[in-house]
Image (cartoon, grey):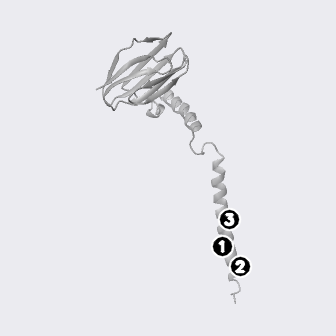
Amino acid sequence: MSVPGSRPAARPAALLVTGLLTALLATGCGQDDDPSVAAPSTAATSAAAPTTAAASATTGSPTPAATPSTPAVDREITVTVAKRRVTPPTGRVTVTKGQLVRITVTSDVADELHVHGYDLGARLPAGMPGAVEFRADKTGLFEVETHETELVLFQLVVR
C-alpha cells in the first residue's frame, strides 16, 4: 500500500527533471543553428581569416594567426616553362638537409610536376602555377621534371 501524498510529490520532481533536461537539450540544439557556434569547417576557417587580417590592419602589426597555412620556407625555387624552354636553364639547385623547400612551376601547357626520390607531384594547369612543398629530409641527387612533356627542370641536391 502506498503512502498518501508520496506519489504526487514524486511526479513534480520527475516533471521538474524532465523539464530541465528538455530545456537544456533545446538550448544546446538551438546553438547549432547559429553559424558562429557551429563546428569548425573549411568555410568557417576561411571566413575567420579576413577578421584576423582586418584586426592586424587596424593595429598596424602582423599577427601570427594571419598566415597559419603558409609557413615560412627556407628555400623557394621558381621555374617557368614556355615553348618547351625551362627558365632558369636546367642545372643543379643545392639545399641543406632539413630545410623546408617549395618548388613552384608555371607551364604554358597542362602538365604534371614530379620530384623523384620524394615521390611528390602537382598538377600544372596551363598558365597557372603548381607547387610542392616538403621537408628535404633525404640526402642525394633528385631529378625534378614534368611528366607529360618529359622536361628536366633541374636536379635537386640535398646535403
According to the image, label 1 marks what residue? 13
Secondary structure of the residue carrying tag 3 is helix
> Residue 111: x, y in percent?
52, 20
Residue most extreme to the left: 159
Residue 41 showing in the rendered view: yes
Alpha carbon separation for disc pair 1 and 3: 10 Å
Q: Given the image, on which type of amino acid does mark 2 rest?
A: Pro
| Up/down of 17 relative to 137, above or below | below
Identify the residue at image location x=48%, y=11%. Answer: 84
Q: Given the image, on which type of amino acid does mark 3 rest?
A: Gly
> Tag 2 or tag 3, which sits nearer the N-term?
2
Question: How many tags in the picture?
Answer: 3
Quarter of the rendering occupied by the C terminus: top left
> Tag 2 or tag 1, which sits nearer the N-term?
2
| Up/down of 82 relative to 59, above or below | above
Q: Residue 19 carries which label?
A: 3
Alpha carbon separation for disc pair 1 and 2: 9 Å
Decide if residue 134 is on the left or right side of residue 127: left
Looking at the picture, tell me which residue is in the foreground, 145 or 48: 145
Q: Which mark is residue 38?
A: none
Residue most extreme to the bottom: 1
Q: Given the image, on which type of amino acid does mark 1 rest?
A: Ala
> Tag 3 or tag 1, which sits nearer the N-term?
1
Residue 61 showing in the rendered view: no
According to the image, label 2 marks what residue? 8
Alpha carbon separation for disc pair 3 and 2: 17 Å
Decide if residue 70 is on the left or right side of residue 10: left
Identify the residue at image location x=65%, y=55%. Answer: 27
> Residue 80: x, y in percent?
46, 14
- The part of the image, by quadrant, that contains residue 116 is top left
